[in-house]
Image: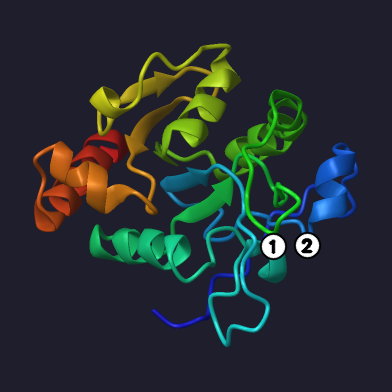
Amino acid sequence: MSGSFPDSRHVLEPDCGRCPELVACRERISWGTGDRDAAVMVVGEAPGAGDPEAATWRGGNWTGKAYTTRHSGRRVRELLAAVGHPNAYVTNAVKCFPCDGEGSNREPTATERANCRTHLRRELATVDPAALLTTGKHATASVLALDGRTLDGFLDGVLEPIDLDCADATVVPLLHPSYQDVWRSRLDYTAAEYRAAVREAIDAAVG
């Protein structure tokens, strides 16, 4: 994978200032990228700090494009290519880097998640995906909140489809790319088996 990403950014509110702490943290808002007619949409939690000096894979905080870091972004996009959906629409539940004051990520607050939910709803309405891949516990919880639902546990529900009524889509929870090697083995998947299971879950959702 090169450092070239689809540039169909769905810019909803170019100077969004709903969350003052996130405005103070961010370099750029990290909007979704990919095919707006994609059958598959990926939702992460929030952009990371990134590396402005990197030749490629600088991260959404610097590129303005979701999942473009060397570690998580590269892994997510390689997985999408491996399962036959390289042009999936890729976004985050929270569009701005939530800094912890020391250069690393903190979890977005409940208010920040709620403030960004309007953006995510509009992306869902625009793309209208059949399969909605949520990467990790927090992204899954954020997406289920669109239906007014809470997440009861996460690991046991990985790859188990969930109907999302508000978007007429099937949610497929995935392991977060930063931790997938650890948790994948605990779920008794090899790397190849996990990719095959992801493909099967997507195929079932897309129909």
Tell me how far mark 1 sits from mark 2, CA to CA: 5 Å
Q: Quadrant of residue 25?
A: bottom right
Q: Which residue is mark 1?
A: 61
Q: Residues within 10 Å of mark 1 (few under 14, many from 20)?
A: many
Q: Residue at x 17, y 48 (%)?
A: 194
Q: Which residue is mark 2?
A: 28
Kind of element beneath mark 2: loop
Q: Quadrant of residue 11?
A: bottom right
Can residue 13 be seen at all in this image of the molecule?
A: no
**Residue 79: x %, y % from top left:** 30, 60
Q: Are marks 1 and 2 in contact (CB under 8 Å)?
A: yes
Q: Residue at x 21, y 48 (%)?
A: 199
| 101, 10: nearer the viewer | 101
Q: How is the image coloured?
A: rainbow
Q: Residues within 10 Å of mark 2 (few under 14, many from 20)?
A: some
Image-based side of 170 in relation to 50, left or right: left
